Image: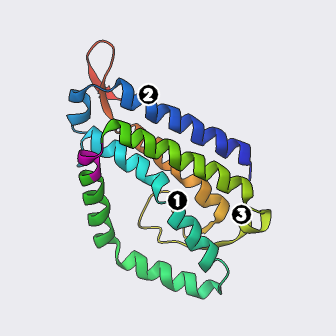
Amino acid sequence: MDRQAVHQDWERVRLTFERLLAEASDDDLRRQSNGTRWTNRQLLFHMLLGFLIMRALLNLVGLLGRLPPAISHGYARLLNAGTRPFDAVNYLSSRFAGNTLSRRAMKHLCDRTVARLHLRLDTETEAALARGMYYPERWDPFFTEYMTLADVYRFPAQHFEFHLTQLTMANRNGEIEPI
């Protein structure tokens, strides 16, 4: 795993997130995103959520990655069976938090979360990064059937980049278009 590339991806995402929050007008944030049921503001929180859930995802791999593969495989099948409730919670939580948190709060959460992830990645051993588990691949386009800890570290930037194209902000000419 190229740790420096992951660090660079996170910093690029963090700065992009900060820029989007700073430059978006209130109208931009209220506008419907492209291809989701969220507004741009709600989608921005959802993009941040990809980083916020990392602690749980990393701990999950740390635990289940040490157990026999059949256990994580069964767990992933159970989670895949619960995709509909997961999708509902995922949608509603981003809708609620996106409408509730201020731009400043979202920026602070992003900065703090990415800083902690930088520190945690730097402490991981190569053996830990190679450890993996089965994942509920129906929960996210970037979850694969089996993921190593290194794969999980790459996830939030992939998730962010995917959703970045769904934001609909006004350009310098005032025209609405995806980012």
Q: Which residues are magenta?
A: 97-101
Q: Is residue 64 left or right of residue 46?
A: right
Q: Residues within 10 Å of mark 2 (few under 14, many from 20)?
A: few
Q: Earlier in the sequence, mark 1 or mark 3?
A: 1
Please state which amino acid type lies under the numbered disc 1: Met
| Residue sticking out furthest to the right | 126
Q: Which mark is residue 78?
A: none
Q: Quadrant of residue 9?
A: top right
The residue at which mark 2 appears reads as 19
Q: For the residue carrying disc 1, how many other residues have a C-alpha within 10 Å: few (<14), some (14-19), or many (20+)?
A: some
- Tell me the colour scheme of the image: rainbow
Q: Is residue 43 left or right of residue 53?
A: left
Image position, residue 150 (x, y; %): 67, 59
Amino acid carrying mark 2 in the image: Arg
The residue singled out by tag 3 in the image is 129
> Looking at the image, which residue sits at the far top?
173
Q: Is residue 54 magenta?
A: no
| Residue hosting label 1 | 54
Q: Is residue 107 above or below residue 98?
A: above
Q: Nearer the viewer, mark 1 or mark 3?
A: 1
Q: Secondary structure at mark 3?
A: helix
- Residue 66 lies, in percent from the top left, at 67, 80
Q: Residue at x 43, y 60 (%)?
A: 140
Q: Earlier in the sequence, mark 2 or mark 1?
A: 2
Q: Position of residue 75 (x, y in %)?
A: 49, 82
Q: Main secondary structure of the magenta part?
A: helix
